[in-house]
């Protein structure tokens, strides 16, 4: 504790600070001049003090303590994505990525591969493997299960999971929800003996990448979790088993500090929701994958996206992600250099920026602590409102969910088109013709039931392409 003689200054309250600011504004309105709105719901003050914190700040843990001595206190895996079309060719790409710094593979599968060829010489105990089925999920789950049994891998040595959930599949393909829940029940049963492999992944990123705010992402994401757990418990699966077999994929966009607060809120809310089902899940045992946002990236001046993906990855680390997945702007169509840059962002944050040396460096921030508390309060209120209307599934079926996201999407896209919202490299500070490096415009389509990824600058890109 600081001694009075050592710090002989008068204590300054928040009211004192505000009075001084109003004096300096010389008649200008405090709120109109300095108070900004985050995600159309949260009032961001120009300054924060200890008076804004409702509770004493704590240092969060984002993963259990490392079992291997000498590892840094903060760990995360560096993910790269692979879309296998030829098993032997993609095996070489996987090995090259792992030999050059990556330690997690995201495989986006539109077919059932030959696992022995695709994963030849891949040492599964030392990496994370995430499988994202684009179709025929049940077939892929079964064939991968058979492969793991054939190689006789120790159950504790398999890390990763399936990037799939019944609700996420519903948003992609529509179909029969009860059949998807039945598949979920089966896949949990098949993988229950693998403690570090998660057969369910609730994809919060769907809402962010399709134009929703961080608040909407958490609201509808937790709505999915409640829907899934409620359906599975009706089939006789314990709620604790459901939560223990579940991980979350979130998307981190360009609002740096709000995104950090969002991710930390996500962990606390996950534990709170689990408690409502009488399941005790500590925040450090939640497995969180964070990818850079497709929504925040622009096809105009694609070089500016290199900056965006860097601080989005940094926000992911500070927010507590267990796996960082930096996605190049054009995804699987990216060239070798773009893929290497995307992978190296996470490595630089770890090896050169030393963000792995402190468990929770943002702990104690008055601003982030206040923001986190406000986000949790709003999301909890929104979840109660969602459940009072019948829950996530009802909102999906009535299309209220999709309408809500689309309204936010169009609002932001029009703000960028009309230049009331600044988008660097798109509507402001565009590069000269000599330095221009745009991506060919791609039109956007989605079915009524879907929420497809798009870009905040989409309408501006479309107007310039015509």
Image (cartoon, rainbow, N blue to C red):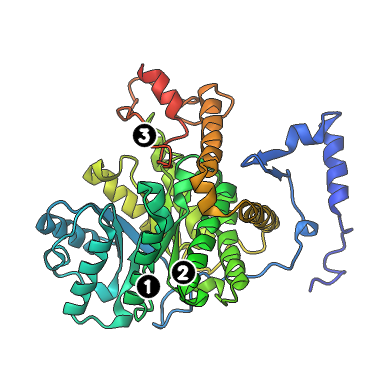
- Residue 53: give x, y in percent of width and height: 75, 60
Residue under label 2, please give it: 232
Q: Is residue 371 above or below residue 424?
A: below
Mark 3 — residue?
302
Q: Assign the C terminus to one quadrant of the image.
A: top left
What number is the disc on residue 205?
none
* Label 1 Cα neighbours within 10 Å, binned few <14 / some 14-19 / many ≥20: many
Give the residue number, with chain letter if any, for mark 1: 188
Which comes sooner in the sequence, label 3 or label 1? Answer: 1
Of badges 1 and 2, the one in the foreground is: 2
Q: CA distance from mark 3 to mark 1?
A: 41 Å
Q: Is residue 422 visible?
A: no
First in residue order: circle 3 vs circle 2: 2
Tell me the SS state at disc 1: helix
Who's the residue at 22% across and 63% down the image? Answer: 99
Secondary structure category for the residue under label 3? loop
Kindly report the distance in space between the C-alpha atoms of the residues bearing marks 1 and 2: 10 Å
Give the percent coordinates (x, y) of residue 80.
Answer: 30, 56
Is 301 or 397 nearer to us in this picture?
397
Corner quadrant of residue 60: bottom right
Residues at badges 1 and 2 in contact (C-beta under 8 Å)?
Answer: yes
Distance (Cα) linking label 3 and label 2: 44 Å
Residue 376, by quadrant, is bottom right
Closest to the observer, 235 or 258: 235
């Amino acid at each position: 504790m600081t001694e009075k003689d050592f710090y002989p200054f008068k204590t300054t309250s928040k009211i004192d600070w505000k009075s001084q600011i109003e004096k300096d504004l010389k008649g200008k309105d405090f709120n109109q001049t300095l108070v900004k709105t985050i995600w159309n719901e949260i009032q961001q003050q120009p300054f924060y003090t200890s008076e804004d914190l409702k509770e004493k700040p704590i240092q969060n843990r984002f993963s259990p303590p490392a079992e291997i001595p000498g590892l840094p206190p903060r760990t995360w895996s560096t993910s790269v994505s692979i879309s296998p079309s030829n098993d032997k060719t993609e095996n070489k790409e996987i090995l090259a990525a792992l030999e050059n710094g990556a330690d997690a593979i995201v495989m986006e599968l539109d077919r059932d591969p030959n696992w022995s060829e695709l994963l030849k010489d891949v040492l599964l105990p030392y990496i994370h493997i995430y499988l994202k089925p684009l179709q025929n999920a049940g077939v892929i789950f079964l064939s991968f299960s058979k492969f793991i049994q054939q190689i006789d891998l120790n159950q504790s040595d398999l890390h990763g999971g399936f990037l799939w959930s019944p609700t996420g599949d519903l948003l992609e393909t529509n179909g029969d929800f009860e059949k998807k829940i039945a598949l979920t029940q089966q896949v949990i049963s098949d993988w229950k003996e693998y403690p570090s492999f998660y057969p369910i992944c609730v994809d919060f990123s769907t809402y962010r990448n399709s134009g929703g705010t961080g608040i909407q992402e958490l609201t509808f994401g937790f709505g999915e979790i409640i829907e899934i757990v409620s359906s599975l418990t009706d089939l006789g699966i314990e709620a604790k088993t459901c939560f223990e077999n579940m991980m979350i994929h979130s998307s981190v966009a360009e609002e740096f500090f709000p995104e950090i607060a969002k991710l930390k809120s996500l962990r606390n809310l996950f534990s709170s929701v689990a408690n409502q089902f009488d399941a005790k899940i500590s925040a450090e045992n939640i497995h969180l994958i964070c990818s850079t946002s497709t929504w925040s990236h622009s096809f105009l001046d694609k070089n500016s996206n290199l900056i965006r993906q860097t601080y989005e990855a940094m926000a992911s680390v500070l927010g507590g992600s267990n796996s960082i997945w930096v996605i190049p702007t054009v995804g699987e169509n990216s060239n070798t250099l773009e893929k290497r840059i995307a992978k190296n962002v996470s490595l630089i944050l770890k090896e050169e920026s030393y963000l792995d040396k402190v468990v929770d460096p943002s702990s104690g921030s008055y601003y982030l602590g206040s923001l986190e508390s406000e986000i949790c309060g709003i999301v909890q209120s929104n979840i109660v409102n969602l459940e009072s209307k019948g829950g996530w599934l009802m909102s999906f079926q009535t299309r209220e969910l999709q309408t809500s996201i689309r309204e936010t999407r169009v609002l932001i896209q029009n703000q960028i088109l009309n230049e009331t919202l600044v988008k660097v490299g798109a509507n402001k500070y565009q590069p000269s013709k000599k330095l221009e490096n745009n991506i060919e415009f791609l039109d956007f389509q989605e079915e009524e039931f879907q929420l497809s990824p798009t870009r905040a600058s989409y309408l501006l890109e479309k107007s310039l392409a015509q």
